[in-house]
Image (cartoon, helix red, strand yellow):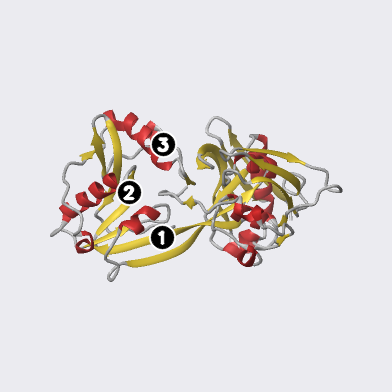
């Protein structure tokens, strides 16, 4: 079968479109690869996002997606990008390519009566163009310690339905409302009440006021649905009346490390973790290898590739397990780490596992 790969690279937009085309001109498979600035390890870094990969049924199982993904990851590496992320249609399918689950969508629904313990608060303002600079500053602060939040830019902020909490000239909280029934291909929500696309805050007082603002809809709405409370553990801690609260957890985001040395240098570590050595088993020289990591008292680190023959790694793991560790999908001890794919811990003190803390992962938007 005669197949050609057609690529359209827009360097300014940071995008690559790929089509696999048959000899007679039929599009067999296609996909888009975007470079986006996303929170990781407390900073904004460029990541590769895989979008809309699809193959017509009659052309499946001949390796077209594998070829496109290889081109997309090459495009990322050429631009200095070390991590790729995607929303999978199948976790087992993308795991074959080195991707692993690192974040979930948590939908929380509760009656408005369940937050009757917070006082009414009406003084939230619609987000307007003149408030956008303050909103970007606020969102940067809100997202700082939450992985996988897209960087906000003035020209891509949707003002509709967004209310902000102003304290002087500073924004300290926000909520994005959608009162309409909604179907989303990622989160599959179709609520019958007040639908929250986004919710954010910088303090317990700000969260109290944002929830108090929701109470202004009492009588008009009976139920609140938070689209994704996964990156909002403070909200779950704040709620008190759980009897009628519903939780739906949906595995959502997968990630792959494309350049292990660079990804390790950007990851978040528990301060004072000291030095450990990590070996990743993978045939790709950019992913596989043995690496020394030295973490200082502030959580900063120095990473270098070391001689495999003379190295005694504290942990040996697969690329998939590496993704779980550096994204802090969970905290791991010797018992739970044994269930990670391809993991062997040789450090008898198991301090290497303590170096990777559990983190907040998630976002409010589909890419």
- Residue 1 versus residue 125: which sits nearer the camera? 125
Q: Is residue 65 visible?
A: no
Label 3 with label 1: CB-CB less than 8 Å = no
How many marks overall?
Answer: 3
> Which element carries disc 2, helix, strand or loop?
strand
> Which element carries disc 3, helix, strand or loop?
helix
> Which element carries disc 1, helix, strand or loop?
strand
- Residue 313 versus residue 67: which sits nearer the camera? 313
Give the crowd class for mark 1: few <14, some 14-19, many >=20 residues within 10 Å. Answer: many
| Residue 326 higher or lower than 266, as above or below | below
Q: Which residue is mark 1?
A: 106
In the orientation shown, which residue stands out farthest toward the left? Answer: 219
| Residue sitting at x 74%, y 59% | 346
Give the crowd class for mark 2: few <14, some 14-19, many >=20 residues within 10 Å. Answer: many
Q: CA distance from mark 3 to mark 1?
A: 22 Å
Q: Which residue is mark 2?
A: 199
Residue 92, image quadrant = bottom right
Q: Position of residue 38 (x, y in %)?
A: 50, 41
Q: Position of residue 205 (x, y in %)?
A: 27, 45
- Quarter of the image for the N terminus: give it: bottom right
Disc nearer the start of the sequence (2/3): 3
Residue 98, image quadrant = bottom right
Q: Position of residue 186 (x, y in %)?
A: 44, 57
Q: Position of residue 8 (x, y in %)?
A: 60, 38
Disc nearer the start of the sequence (2/1): 1
Q: CA distance from mark 2 to mark 3?
A: 14 Å
Q: Which residue is mark 3?
A: 140
> Residue 26: which disc?
none
Q: Is residue 344 visible?
A: yes
| Residue sitting at x 43%, y 49% | 363
């Amino acid at each position: 079968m005669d197949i050609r790969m057609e690529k359209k690279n827009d360097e300014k937009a940071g995008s690559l479109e790929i089509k696999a085309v048959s000899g007679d001109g039929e599009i067999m498979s296609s996909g888009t690869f975007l470079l986006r600035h996303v929170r990781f390890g407390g900073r904004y870094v460029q990541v590769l996002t895989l979008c809309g990969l699809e193959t017509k049924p009659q052309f499946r199982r001949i390796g077209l997606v594998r070829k496109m993904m290889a081109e997309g990851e090459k495009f990322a590496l050429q631009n200095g990008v070390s991590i790729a992320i995607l929303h999978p249609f199948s976790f087992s399918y993308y795991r074959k390519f080195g991707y692993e689950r690192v974040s979930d969508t948590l939908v929380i629904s509760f009656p408005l009566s369940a937050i009757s313990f917070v006082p009414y608060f009406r003084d939230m303002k619609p987000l307007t163009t003149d408030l956008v600079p303050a909103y970007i500053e606020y969102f940067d602060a809100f997202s700082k310690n939450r992985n996988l939040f897209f960087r906000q830019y003035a020209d891509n902020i949707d003002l509709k339905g967004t209310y902000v909490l102003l304290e002087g000239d500073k924004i300290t909280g926000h909520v994005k409302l959608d009162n309409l029934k909604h179907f989303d291909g990622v989160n599959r929500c179709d609520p019958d009440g007040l639908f929250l696309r986004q919710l954010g805050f910088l303090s317990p007082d700000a969260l109290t006021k944002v929830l108090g603002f929701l109470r202004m809809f009492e009588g008009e709405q009976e139920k609140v649905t938070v689209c994704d409370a996964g990156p909002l553990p403070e909200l779950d801690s704040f709620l008190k009346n759980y009897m009628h609260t519903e939780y739906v957890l949906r595995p959502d985001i997968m990630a792959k490390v494309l350049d292990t040395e660079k990804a390790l240098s950007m990851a978040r570590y528990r301060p004072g973790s000291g030095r450990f050595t990590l070996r990743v088993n993978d045939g790709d020289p950019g992913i596989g290898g043995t690496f020394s990591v030295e973490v200082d008292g502030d959580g900063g680190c120095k990473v270098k590739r070391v001689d495999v023959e003379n190295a005694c790694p504290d942990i040996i793991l697969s690329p998939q397990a590496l993704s779980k560790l550096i994204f802090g999908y969970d905290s791991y001890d010797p018992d739970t780490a044994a269930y990670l794919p391809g993991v062997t811990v040789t450090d008898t003190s198991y301090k290497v596992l303590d170096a990777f803390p559990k983190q907040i992962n998630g976002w409010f938007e589909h890419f």
